[in-house]
Amino acid sequence: MENKKKPLIRRDFIFGSKSFINLFWAFSSLIGGSLFFLLGLCSYFKLNFLFQLNQIQFFPQGLLLLFYGLAGSLLSLYLWSILLLSIGDGYNEFNKITNRIKIFRWGFPGKNRKIKLDYSFSDIENLSLYIRQGFNPQSILYLKLKNKIKIPLTRNDSVFNLEEFEYYAADLARFLQISLKDEIEN
């Protein structure tokens, strides 16, 4: 019989803002916002850049195009900045040697850019698995502490295959040797 050593440290990496949908909206708002802004400027300077803009008066249509273009460009700037700064990325480390849980995430630049949480295994009450089905499905795994604080261990917008997600949660509960509670909402 083989004696397999079980790992004593488990580290799960979390990819916060890096998702296809964020990339899609960042790219779409950059293209759309830039075009609207350019069309608004062309209507102000009476230039026919992409379309026949003779029919578009600067006030009110061109001004509105400028405003929407600026809003779209600012939204794009925000989305690209959270993608490039890796907002929400980090890891969950479960260490059986020190009996500690370390949760690390990258935040926005500033004094609190690095978000670090450190708890003892004795502070843990259970793992809580929240599943919402229906039009806007969600699957979130929470670490519930004895003082009733719930710390999300997975992204809020992550939609896993339900079977894989339950296996991941059960595997983590086995590793930590704690109970797993279900919260299912239809």
Image: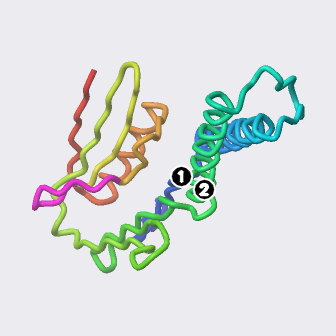
Q: Is residue 146 magenta?
A: yes
- Read off the residue under disc 1: 17
- Residue bearing the label numbered 2: 83
Residue in the picture at 62% in, 48% down = 76
Crowding around mark 1 (Cα neighbors within 10 Å: few <14, some 14 to 19, many 20+) is many
| Visible residue check, residue 93 | yes
Is disc 2 placed on a helix, strand or loop? helix
- Identified by mark 1, the residue type is Ser
State the residue at coordinates (25%, 26%): 185
Q: Amino acid at mark 2?
A: Leu
Q: Is residue 134 above or below residue 8?
A: above
Q: Is residue 184 left or right of residue 148?
A: right
Q: Which quadrant holds residue 184? A: top left
Q: Label 2 near label 1: C-beta < 8 Å?
A: yes
Dot placed on the residue nearer the N-terminal end, 1 or 2:
1
Dot 2, how many residues are within 10 Å of its Cα: few (below 14), some (14-19), or many (20+)?
A: some
Specify the segment rendered in magenta: 144-152
